[in-house]
Image: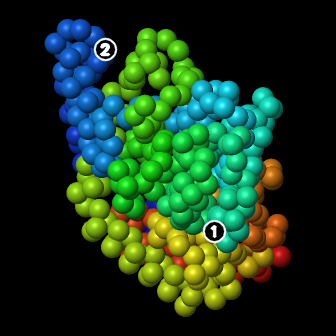
Amino acid sequence: MKNQIYLDSASTTRPSDEVVKYLTDIMIESYANPDSMHSFGIEAEKNVENARNIIASSINAKNEEIIFTSSGTEANNLAIFGSAEALKRRGNKIITTNSDHPSVYVPMRELEKKGFQVIYLSALNGKINIEELKNNLDEKVILISIMFINNETGSIYDIPEIIKAVENSGFRDKIYIHCDAVQAFCKIKIDLNKLNIDMMSISSHKIHGIKGCGALFLRKNKRIIPQIYGGGQENNLRSSTLNTPGIFAFGKAVGEANKNFHENNKYIQDIYDYTVEKIKENCPEIIFNQQANENISKYILSLKLPDIKSEIMLNYMSGQGIYISSGSACSEKNRDSKESKRVLLNYGLNKNSAGSTIRISFSKYNTFDEINDFVTVLSNGIKKLTMKK
């Protein structure tokens, strides 16, 4: 193969051509500190606010409800620690899932050390146990944090059903609902006028922006405690000189994603279906982890190899110029740790299946020819690696 094939877009996406061109120009034209009072700084501030408006409008939020951060991870930490500290006089009970991203799961473990009670809901086969949620709702609950789309399995969690359960409990006014939407933002339609959540985390580099920029939606009149102190930027909620290139790129990426939303999703659907078909034809030994009746994101495909450890296949594919993953990049380097397999085990896989799972994730830049090459190499890899045993 002449070209490298990148099928790891759930970890990070290639910056789009439009973003790169736009950023090359605007970084030179608007590099001033947006907090500076001179006209050059004011111009930078206008460009920041333009990006903020694009992002806010895309989810039907108000501009002042968007707080820029350095990443989706920081947005999750700000939401979780910030709300826990703000609401701890009301209660000490928090609800999440046993399969959320490490940037939610690890902060929850830290809060447990500080005396908070954390309930980890089951998400077996990609479905939140709503009855388990209802049974744990009481006057002590202050925060619920559940991701929109699981980054390893592609499961779409039923956030509207979760909200409905909370609203019917009689405790909604006392509870903040946070959603990690990093894998969902600009891939499914999110209307925050209709979706009654209080906080939502998003990230630029998952949608063809650049790394180093994320944001937290914080609904107006909801109070959280800052986690970074200093100059009082972002309405005193996230001090630090703003990452203007990252913000500019974020706004541009969101604008492009929204303009081409239906076209992109149709293309991803076709690529996903084609990949499934080719794997079934050429690699019958592979098991599809995702359930037939499961609501899944077509941007992510989870596959179990036939008794081949995922890292061995990753190394083989990488040597052929094809880049895939075994799961979250945030825990992938610690493949022997419990954290590296936590999500897949809680999804319902056994230890051997979790250790033999690979993740394929797509973007608008993938082609059908790339899928043909990928499946050919995957099939050859299965034959060669199985023979070595």
* Residue 261 in view, yes or no: yes
- Relative to 266, does residue 45 appear above or below in the rendering? above
What amino acid type is highlighted by mark number 1? Lys
Q: Which mark is residue 345?
A: none
Chosen colour scheme: rainbow
In the image, 338 versus 62, the foreground residue is 62
Q: Secondary structure at mark 1?
A: loop
- Relative to 121, does residue 268 appear above or below in the rendering? below
Residue 205 is situated, as x and y percent measured from the top left of the image, at 43, 45
Q: Secondary structure at mark 2?
A: loop
In the image, 291 versus 170, the foreground residue is 170
Could you tell me which residue is drawn at 73 percent across and 35 percent down?
A: 92
| Mark in front: 2 vs 1 | 1
Residue 183 is situated, as x and y percent measured from the top left of the image, at 49, 55
Could you tell me which residue is drawn at 23 percent across and 8 percent down?
A: 37
What amino acid type is highlighted by mark number 2? Asp
Pointer 2 with pointer 1, Cβ within 8 A:
no
Q: Quadrant of residue 80?
A: top right
Q: How many marks?
A: 2
Could you tell me which residue is drawn at 58 percent across and 32 percent down?
A: 83
Residue 332 is situated, as x and y percent measured from the top left of the image, at 68, 51
Would you name the residue on which mark 1 appears? 127
Q: Earlier in the sequence, mark 2 or mark 1?
A: 2
Would you name the residue on which mark 2 appears? 35
* Residue 211 in view, yes or no: no
Disc 1 crowd rating (10 Å Cα; few below 14, some 14-19, many 20+) is: some
Could you tell me which residue is drawn at 26 percent across and 52 percent down?
A: 256
- Relative to 158, does residue 217 appear above or below in the rendering? above
